[in-house]
Image (cartoon, rainbow, N blue to C red):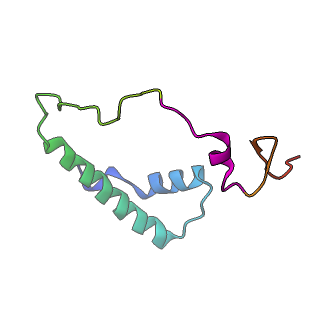
């Protein structure tokens, strides 16, 4: 990538779109940083393509029907309950 891939005008344009006011020294700083970031992305072009897909294995347990808790056991630690249901604060 050439050195002028990111211009100060481009940085000012992006800053204007983002409604960010930048001082001239900040524009220079971001111009250098954006150029460095784009150069870092160019290194990804040198990564060789992978010829095969990775073997994927399902790590989730099987979905099985199991007995649930009894109502009294489920409500045992609830701070408040009413008619075998959890009771929470009123939300309006």
Q: Answer with left or right where residue 8 lies relative to residue 36.
A: right
Residue 70's x, y, as percent?
62, 40
Using the rendered view, name the quadrant where residue 21 is placed: bottom right
Task: Specify start and end residues of the magenta stretch as a single range.
Answer: 66-78
Q: Is residue 73 magenta?
A: yes
Vertical arrangement, residue 59 with respect to residue 14, above or below: above
Q: Quadrant of residue 47?
A: top left
- The residue positioned 20% from the left and 45% from the top of the image is 44
29 lies above or below 67: below
Residue occupying the point 46% across, 56% down: 11
Residue 77 position within the rendered picture, expressed as x and y whole percent measured from the top left = 66, 56
Look at 10% across and 28% down and name the residue there.
Answer: 51
For residue 5, side relative to residue 77 (left or right): left
Considering depth in this image, is 19 or 87 the residue closer to the camera?
87
Judge by depth and name the residue closer to the eye, 7 or 79: 79
From the top left corner, tell me how far across and down residue 40 is, in percent. Answer: 25, 54
Query: What secondary structure predominates along the stretch shown in magenta?
Result: loop
Q: Position of residue 53 (x, y in %)?
A: 17, 28
- Magenta residue check for 13: no
Q: Nearer the viewer, residue 88 or 38?
A: 88
């Amino acid at each position: 990538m050439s050195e002028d891939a990111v211009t100060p005008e481009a940085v000012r344009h992006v800053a204007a779109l983002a409604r960010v006011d930048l001082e001239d020294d900040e524009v220079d700083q971001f111009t250098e940083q954006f150029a460095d970031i784009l150069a870092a992305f160019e290194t990804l072009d040198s990564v060789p393509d992978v010829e095969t897909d990775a073997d994927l294995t399902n790590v989730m347990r099987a979905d099985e029907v199991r007995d649930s808790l009894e109502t009294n056991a489920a409500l045992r630690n609830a701070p408040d309950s009413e008619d075998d249901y959890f009771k929470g604060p009123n939300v309006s």
